[in-house]
Amino acid sequence: MAPIVGFDTNIVIPALLFPGGSPLLCVSMARNERIQSVTCQEILDEFSEKLIVKFTLSEEKTEEIIEEVCQFSRIVRINQELALVSADPDDDMIIECASLARRPILSRGTNIFPHF
């Protein structure tokens, strides 16, 4: 069974907009099923917002990128009940997504939380 990983926007966005380095390696591993990416609608909404607002992408291009993420990710439903990361509450969504799977690894780009 492939390790299960929850990616934050600072992994997926650079991997898809500026291919190269560790973010691209992470996404490539998910595409090749060496790891299993897990996400939720709330994280996809956060991706969309950042792509449109911060990177000024069109809604059409944003939808293409979100569809690509969905192709290599398992979508789960979260309750948004966790409050573990006071420095960045949006990270709670990543933890909650990954905690729904067996033995997850969480990736924010700068920190890795193995086996939450």
Image (cartoon, rainbow, N blue to C red):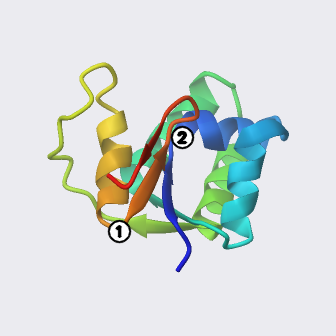
Q: Amino acid at mark 2?
A: Phe
* Residue that carries the numbered disc 1 in the rendered image: 101
Question: Which quarter of the picture shows residue 100?
Answer: bottom left
39 vs 77, left or right, is right
In depth, the one of 60 and 6 nearer the eye is 6
Name which residue lies at 30% across and 64% down: 77
Q: Which numbered tag is attached to residue 47?
A: 2
Name which residue lies at 85% across and 39% down: 20
Question: Is 45 located above or below residue 37 in the figure?
Answer: above
Name which residue lies at 71% across and 33% down: 57
* Tally of marks: 2
Q: Residues within 10 Å of mark 1 (few under 14, many from 20)?
A: some
Question: Which quarter of the picture shows residue 90?
Answer: top left
72 vs 86, left or right, is right
Residue farthest to the front, as pictured: 114
Looking at the image, is mark 2 or mark 1 earlier in the sequence? Answer: 2
Q: Residues within 10 Å of mark 2 (few under 14, many from 20)?
A: many
Residue farthest to the bottom, as pictured: 1
Secondary structure of the residue carrying numbered label 1? loop
- Image location (x, y in percent) of residue 92: 29, 39
Name which residue lies at 66% across and 63% down: 30
In depth, the one of 99 and 15 nearer the eye is 99
- Image location (x, y in percent) of residue 104: 41, 60
Residue 84: tell me if it is visible: yes
